[in-house]
Image (cartoon, rainbow, N blue to C red):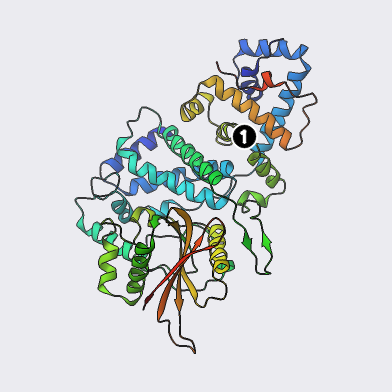
Amino acid sequence: MTHPLEHLAPYVDGAIAPSEQAVVDEHLRSCARCRGEVAAARAAREALRASPEPAAPDLASLFTPERIAELTAPGTKGRAPWAKAAPALAAAAVVALVALAVPRLGTSSDDTVSGGIEAADTAVAPSGPVRLALDDTDYDVASLQEAATTYAASLTGGDDAVAASATPAEGATAVAPPDEQLRFAGRARTAKATRCLRRAFPGFPGEIAAARLARFEGDPAYLGFVLESPGAGTPPDTLSVWVASADDCSILSITSARL
Amino acid sequence: MTEAERDEELVRRFRAGEPEAFADLVRRHQPRVYSVCLRVLGDADAAADVAQDTFLTVLRKLDGFRGDAAFTTWLHRVAVNACYDELRRKRRRPMLHVVADDGAEHEPGAPAPDHADEVAGTRDVAAALASIPEQFRMALVLADVQDMAYEQISEVLDVPVGTVKSRVHRGRLALAAALGIDRGREPRGPAETSEQEP
């Protein structure tokens, strides 16, 4: 017996041509197996259609004119016609990029991270809990140290930090390409990252100020930017960068820079 | 103005130098793109990331979009490819052991609950959907969630229409089995369950 398999999906949809429907109807009268399949497929279709649509995150708010100019500016893939004609937008993009390189200081608690997609395109340092940045950079010892130095300088407001952050495409800098800095992971992956870092560095002092998912010498790695204070209520004087394997939470590296 | 014409108008305005038109495009399509990503990936955080990636790709490639296909078809093709990329990454990525506050080590749990899980029974559908083969899942999501015509799904997935119909039917049967729906008969043999190419 030849089963009209290709026609069963549109048959279940009720969107089958009349001539084909007659063929399927005729077949179903004599084929219990296909009748069973049609019934099961119909039930599955109804179950899927009955499941409610989830509420989507607000992605549109990420695509501000400034961000679009940044993403389509020379040196990145693609280009929009206004990018080369609007130096003011380009300047705004640099400001936003600097802000991205200066994640906010806050709690490292895994359970208090906020929901939704973080608006990464603000011209000021984003406020709120730690959010895992997705960074395609493959770090090594040298670039990790550069990342620590740049990050530390950015916290102290040094001109070097601004210069380094504004020129991410020049050489193997520690600053990720602006495209990648746009993206942040959600709550679950952020919580995994901070747990992994704490597991890799148990008992190490300091507060995780920012985290990235990147690579270290080819292996997936979490980078934790940690502020260390001498204690007794004094302000942090050292920035450490913890590097833990994203595969098994083992220590891969650690470096630091003075604030 | 039809939906397709509205998309074409926004694309035209974006190309003419109105960046706000792109945000309008995102606003119009983010529910559908996120829905596809969430149903296919089964993880709300990953779905948000991949949906964001989809629109980034669209932004970069919009100048090269020739309009041979409808914008929605092209957009879905980008989203589908982004989902497949994420699924490949997920397969390559070893599962991470995490330590909870109580010090006990746990395997990562089920995908993070999404908004759909707020309705009783929806978790079952989402879990069942996540358990069926990726190709079936993708076809099923486009057909039964996005309500796309088989011809459009064929364009999105770049496979013949007959293959789409076969995948949708097989996907429904696989979903039914995962949901515990009894089809009342023995499954077909291997020769009969293979994908039917036209």
Q: Is residue A145 above or below residue B25?
A: below
Q: Which residue is mark 1?
A: B133
Q: Residue at x 72, y 37 (%)?
A: B178
**Closer to us: B6 or A83:** A83
Q: Residue at x 34, y 45 (%)?
A: B21
**Closer to us: A259 or A21:** A259
Q: Is residue B197 above or below residue A170?
A: above
Q: Residue A87, how many percent across, how many down?
A: 20, 57
Amino acid on which disc 1 is placed: Pro
Q: Is residue B95 above or below residue B174?
A: below
The disc numbered 1 marks a residue on which chain?
A: B
Work out which quarter of the rendered image holds the N terminus of chain B and state it.
top left
Q: Residue B117, how many percent across, how many down?
A: 66, 50
Give the total number of marks visible in the rendering: 1
Left or right of A76 on screen, residue A134: right
Work out which quarter of the rendered image holds the C terminus of chain B and state it.
top right
Tag 1 secondary structure: loop
Taking the image as drawn, is residue B2 in sight? no
**Closer to us: B136 or B58:** B136
Q: Residue B164, how many percent across, how many down?
A: 56, 25
Farthest bottom residue?
Answer: A232
Q: Quadrant of residue B176?
A: top right
Q: Is residue A91 above or below residue A55?
A: below
Q: Residue at x 77, y 27 (%)?
A: B183
Taking the image as drawn, is residue B197 in sight? yes
Left or right of A13 on screen, residue A217: left
